[in-house]
Image (spheres, rainbow, N blue to C red):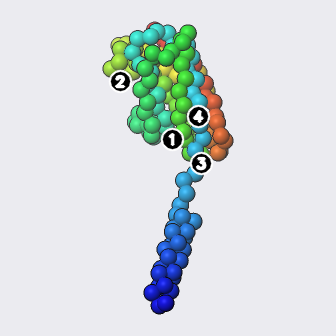
Amino acid sequence: MHLKRIVKSSAAAIICIIFMSLTLSPQGEEKTTVKINITEIRSDKGNILVGVFTDHEGFAREEGIIDIKLSKDKMENGSMNTTIELEPGTYGISVLDDENDNGEMDTNFLGIPKEGFGFSDYYHTALRKPAFEDFKFTIKGEDTVRIDIRMNYYL
């Protein structure tokens, strides 16, 4: 009889510990599906590089929290899509049409980009690099967010 009580109380203690650990442990925030639509890609050469940033400093250093390399195999009529999952917060997305597949933006002797580029819901036309503030967006916990990126080519 004494053994049965020990087994019952031990099982109850284990169940209680498991329940407490599940309810007290920090839960990750719900992620939002971000559908990225990239348009006006001029050729099927190379790959598309996508960088996701959370602030100006990361963008200036070109150190994204997410870096994606997309094959142009699924490109149709100069457009392609990809999907990522992000927690609520502020982000900016930049895209490079890495036509020669060397992993970097190529420029001419004046520093003008030779390859295409684009930013989240922002069409950049100036010769200087944009600020993070120009193309940032905020996720507040929606189920899905759509981001349109129109490629721009100077040369």
Q: Which mark is residue 34?
A: 4
Check residue 103 in the rendering and tell me which mark sits there, or answer none.
2
Q: Could you say whether the residue bearing mark 4 is in a helix, strand or loop?
A: strand
Do labels 2 and 4 touch, CB within 8 Å?
A: no
The residue positioned 58% from the left and 23% from the top of the image is 37
- Residue for badge 3: 30
In the rendered structure, the answer to whether residue 90 lies left or right of residue 110 reads right
**Residue at figure coordinates x 46%, y 31% from the top left:** 51
Estimate the spatial distance between the alpha carbons at disc 2 and disc 4, rounded to whole Å: 24 Å
Amino acid bearing label 3: Glu
The residue furthest front is 1
Quadrant in the rendering for residue 96: top left
Going from N to C along the chain, the mark reached first, 1 or 4, is 4
- The location of residue 109, given as percent across then percent down, is 35, 13
Determine the CA span between mark 1 and mark 4. 15 Å
| Left or right side of 139 for 68 | left
